[in-house]
């Protein structure tokens, strides 16, 4: 009996030790994953997160750091002359090796990464030629060929289309890709023409039924909605000559009014007028001749045939409906969906950058004061339309689900992921806020309010946006399925 008790106590001690070791390993993994460079480098070495979901320039940075270009060959005469002038210098291969050895030793956070021998197994052996990469034109041609192959298939592979679209969609394929990702176009090629014809005819029949009626025939509720739309449309993207054109404004009024009447649970809410712009612009530029689009992306709307404009308007209406169907509680009474997103943003910022969170609280800044518009309009008023169009490539590739839904089911079954652009958008807003963390921590209340309402993003290019998306994606994968990370902030 004593021996049995001793063995049982040993078994319990061993189980406790194993649990403690597992906790330490998880802590090391979390610490290692907190470094963006380590995560991105680790993606290419077999981690579940694939590099295809990261913007290309991030992958190129890791690739260039892993496979540096070979040193230029030096003629023998020049090498001899250089050797006479600096006899104490080691040969080129030794100099290169010594520069590598001079790097600082890896920190303890790297202990969770694979050993160096396994990480470097993909490197070419000494003396082998370094891999050669094609020019940017070749890469763009390959990207275009990939989209053409995916979208021209008899049955479109939506998984492949999502992976390819995450890093951006070529302009000539954006309309078809967005319509496929939203489920507006069927994946079967044979059904597309008939589906488009039916949906466009249905919208055309709704215009005289709902919009082209006398004001006296509208109810008081309908007149209030129509009045608000007439006020908001001229304010929408006031800097764009295209969206200030009367013909385009009339199209936007019809889209918004008919959508509001068909969705009485929410009706029209300010902010929805911003969400229709990317669809209208992308579909219009894809439907007209290239010579009608100037360098700024504006279209000569007077030269666009009426039937083309009618198709653009109908497609924009249905795609807006598809987008809003999954976030409709963002625009119902009290807008609970947006309230949840703002609360989640506050949790994320407190977890990632506690000093900034404490400074905002000290200055009396409530997240709802600046983040409500970020969620309501999906950053439409913080970024220019070209940047929004690129960002929506990634958002639509992410899919649509509720902010509180997990990214995968508890069983982890393949093919049932509930990735959501609403989930990613919260982390994009967190990355946007934390980008100016150091600057914000030196501001007082009035400066904070003015800065957060007028972010300095007017000069942003695609590079800055893709860095923002990359950071947001990494945080989403790190924190969203591990809610304990966000809850642990209160255990201080």
Image (cartoon, rainbow, N blue to C red):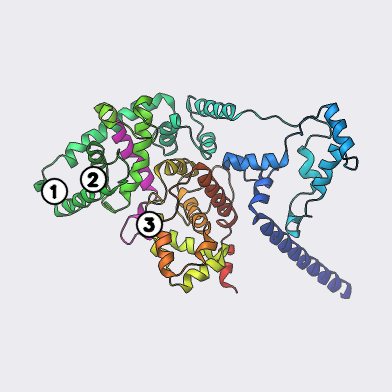
At x 51%, y 34%, the residue is 161
Q: Nearer the viewer, mark 3 or mark 1?
A: 3
Residue 228 pos. (x, y %): 22, 52
Near mark 1 (Cα within 10 A), the count class, few <14, some 14-19 or many ≥20, is: some
Instruction: From the viewer's side, name the closer residue of 200 and 175.
Output: 175
Is the residue marked by circle 3 packed among few (<14), some (14-19), or many (20+) residues within 10 Å?
A: some
Report whether residue 214 is seen.
yes
Count how many numbered circles sit on residues in the image: 3
Label placed on residue 318? none
Q: CA distance from mark 1 to mark 2?
A: 12 Å
Image location (x, y in percent) of residue 452: 43, 60
Residue located beneath label 1 in the image: 218
SS under mark 3: helix
Q: Secondary structure at mark 1?
A: loop
Vertical relation: 313 (above or below) 110: above
As for residue 321 lying within the magenta part, the answer is yes
Q: Position of residue 250 (x, y in %)?
A: 22, 39
Magenta part of the protein: which range? 311-336
Would you name the residue on which mark 3 appears?
373
Of labels 3 and 1, earlier in sequence is: 1
Quick one: 221 or 137, which is closer to the camera?
Answer: 137
Whether residue 371 appears in this view of the structure is no
Q: Which mark is residue 257?
A: 2
- Relative to 80, is 106 above or below? below
Q: How would you classify the magenta stretch by its main secondary structure?
A: helix
Q: Is residue 225 above or below residue 364?
A: above
291 relative position to 110: left or right: left
User: In the displayed image of the protein, which residue is found farthest to the left?
Assistant: 216
């Amino acid at each position: 009996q004593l021996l049995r008790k001793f063995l049982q106590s040993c078994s319990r001690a061993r189980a406790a030790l194993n649990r403690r070791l597992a906790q330490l390993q998880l802590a090391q993994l979390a610490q290692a994953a907190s470094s963006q460079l380590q995560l991105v480098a680790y993606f290419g070495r077999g981690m579940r997160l694939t590099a295809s979901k990261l913007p290309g320039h991030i992958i190129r940075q890791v690739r260039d750091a892993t496979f540096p270009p070979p040193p230029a060959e030096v003629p023998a005469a020049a090498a001899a002359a250089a050797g006479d002038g600096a006899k104490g210098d080691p040969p080129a291969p030794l100099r290169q090796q010594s520069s590598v050895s001079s790097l600082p030793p890896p920190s303890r956070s790297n202990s969770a990464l694979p050993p160096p021998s396994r990480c470097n197994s993909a490197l070419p052996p000494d003396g082998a030629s370094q891999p050669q990469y094609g020019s940017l034109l070749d890469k763009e041609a390959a990207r275009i060929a990939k989209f053409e192959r995916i979208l021209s298939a008899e049955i479109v592979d939506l998984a492949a289309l999502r992976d390819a679209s995450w890093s951006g969609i070529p302009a000539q394929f954006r309309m078809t890709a967005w319509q496929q990702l939203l489920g507006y176009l069927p994946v079967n090629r044979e059904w597309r023409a008939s589906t488009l014809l039916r949906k466009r005819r249905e919208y055309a029949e709704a215009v005289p039924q709902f919009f082209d009626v006398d004001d006296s025939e509208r109810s008081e509720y309908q007149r209030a909605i129509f009045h608000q739309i007439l006020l908001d449309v001229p304010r929408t993207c006031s800097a764009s000559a295209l969206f200030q054109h009367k013909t385009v404004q009339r199209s936007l009024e019809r889209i918004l009014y008919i959508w509001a009447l068909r969705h009485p649970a929410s009706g029209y809410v300010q902010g929805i007028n911003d969400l229709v712009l990317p669809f209208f612009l992308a579909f219009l530029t894809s439907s007209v001749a290239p010579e009608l689009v100037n360098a700024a992306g504006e279209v000569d709307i007077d030269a666009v045939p009426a039937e083309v404009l009618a198709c653009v308007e109908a497609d924009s209406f249905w795609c807006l409906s598809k987008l809003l169907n999954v976030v409709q509680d963002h625009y119902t009474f009290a807008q609970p969906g947006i309230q949840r997103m703002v609360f989640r943003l506050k949790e994320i910022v407190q977890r990632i950058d506690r000093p900034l969170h404490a400074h905002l609280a000290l200055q009396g800044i409530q997240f709802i004061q600046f983040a409500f518009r970020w969620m309501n309009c999906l950053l439409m008023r913080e970024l220019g339309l070209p940047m929004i169009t690129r960002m929506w490539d990634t958002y639509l590739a992410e899919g649509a689900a509720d902010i509180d839904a997990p990214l995968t089911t508890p069983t982890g079954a393949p093919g049932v992921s509930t990735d959501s652009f609403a989930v990613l958008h919260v982390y994009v807003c967190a990355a946007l806020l934390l980008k100016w963390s150091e600057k914000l921590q030196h501001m007082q209340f009035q400066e904070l309010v003015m800065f957060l309402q007028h972010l300095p993003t007017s000069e942003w290019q695609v590079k800055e946006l893709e860095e923002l998306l990359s950071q947001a994606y990494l945080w989403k994968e790190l924190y969203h399925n591990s809610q304990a990370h966000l809850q642990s902030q209160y255990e201080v």
